[in-house]
Amino acid sequence: MRLIQKATALSALLLPGAVAWGSLGHITVAYIATNFVKDTTTTYFQDILRNDTQHYLAGVATWADSIRYTKWGRFSKNFHFIDAKDSPPDYCGVDFERDCKDEGCVVSSIQNYTSQLLDTDLWSWRRGQAAKFVIHFVGDIHQPLHVENVAQGGNGIHVKWDQSEVNLHHVWDTSIAEKMLGGIHRKPYDAGLVWAANLTEQIKSGKYQTASKLWNTGVNLDDPIQTAMGWANESNAVVCTHVFPEGPKSIVGQELAGDYYEKAAPVIELQVAKAGYRLAAWLDLIADRASGTAQPPEEL
Ligand SMILES: *[C@@H]1O[C@H](CO)[C@@H](O)[C@H](O)[C@H]1NC(C)=O
Ligand SMILES: *[C@@H]1O[C@H](CO)[C@@H](O)[C@H](O)[C@H]1NC(C)=O
Ligand SMILES: *[C@@H]1O[C@H](CO)[C@@H](O)[C@H](O)[C@H]1NC(C)=O
Ligand SMILES: *[C@@H]1O[C@H](CO)[C@@H](O)[C@H](O)[C@H]1NC(C)=O
């Protein structure tokens, strides 16, 4: 059993482009959320996830990627994104009816797994699994190319990064964040912990202090679709302003580690900070509701 699990995990790792919103992004989002949740929320999720260390969220943040290419996990492969059929750079925007596939998308999945987390009739292992999906998908939805249809979220567009050939999706998942942190990180948990501490400080008393007060406006546990659509539409707007400022055709083959990177880096930083801060609020709402301490309906 152990061997089989190891083998599947390994084959998932070997698939090119298998890791979405790089591990670093997901882990950092999870550590930021860890820093902002209420104490009662910490206890609630440490219990569900059976881990009483500070790594209880970060340790499961990439689980959804590790199963998506396995036979068992294939059902979840469309849950990581929503293919907004817009027309960057002239028109951006997400439409749930138009863009969410019948098999599901990141928006419907945030709803699906949030409702499973709140369903006390489910076995606790099912709610643990639902928690892992929610933690992951709130990260994914903040990556602009997880909310874009063009070339499968940029996977089909080849560009250059410090002279190496990579696809555009990978640049936004991983390359920009790694360059910001000074290079490729073989220890994403250590790097994520440090980055999260920095962004937590920026939210509490730094450059995001004022703006972050509005980041949870309209967040509503009774309407996960509308809440997640707000997040999706906001990251999709970045596709027009920063991902394809001159349109998809003109980016093909371009070197992106220079000027393009300089403009993209602050956006990545902001999206990671928002994702972590919002994940904390979402987990607070879930834990309050589940433990009956919320005054329903609770809205932020
Ligand atoms: C908690 O999670 C961390 C990160 O995945 C792991 O290293 C640690 O062993 C876990 N602790 C327990 C008690 O499961
Ligand atoms: C909701 O989650 C369950 C359990 O993982 C999954 O089987 C089902 O396909 C999901 N439903 C939708 C509409 O995504
Ligand atoms: C956070 O990172 C920024 C660069 O992204 C740096 O200028 C700043 O000094 C860091 N802050 C802390 C508290 O480490
Ligand atoms: C979605 O984003 C577009 C710009 O990208 C904006 O024009 C539109 O008002 C937004 N829609 C919602 C519902 O927020």
Image (spheres, rainbow, N blue to C red):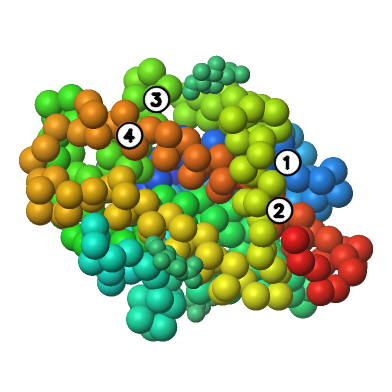
| Mark 1 vs mark 4, CA separation in Å | 28 Å
Disc number lying in front (1 or 4): 4
Rendering quadrant holding ligand 3 = top right
Is ligand 3 within 8 Å of the beta carbon of the residue shown at mark 3? yes
Q: Which residue is mark 3?
A: 180
Is ligand 4 within 8 Å of the beta carbon of the residue shown at mark 2? no
* SS category of the residue bearing label 2: helix
* SS category of the residue bearing label 3: helix
| Mark 4 vs mark 2, CA separation in Å | 28 Å
| Mark 3 vs mark 2, CA separation in Å | 26 Å
* Structural crowding at the residue carrying mark 4, measured as other residues with C-alpha within 10 Å and reported as few (<14), some (14–19) or many (≥20): few
- The answer to whether the residue labelled 1 contacts the one labelled 2, judged by CB atoms less than 8 Å apart, is yes
Sequence-wise first label, 1 or 3: 1
Image: 90 above or below 100: above
Is ligand 3 within 8 Å of the beta carbon of the residue shown at mark 4? no
Residue 255: x and y, percent?
14, 32
Amino acid type at circle 3 is Met
Sequence-wise first label, 4 or 2: 4
* SS category of the residue bearing label 1: helix
Residue 173: x and y, percent?
35, 43
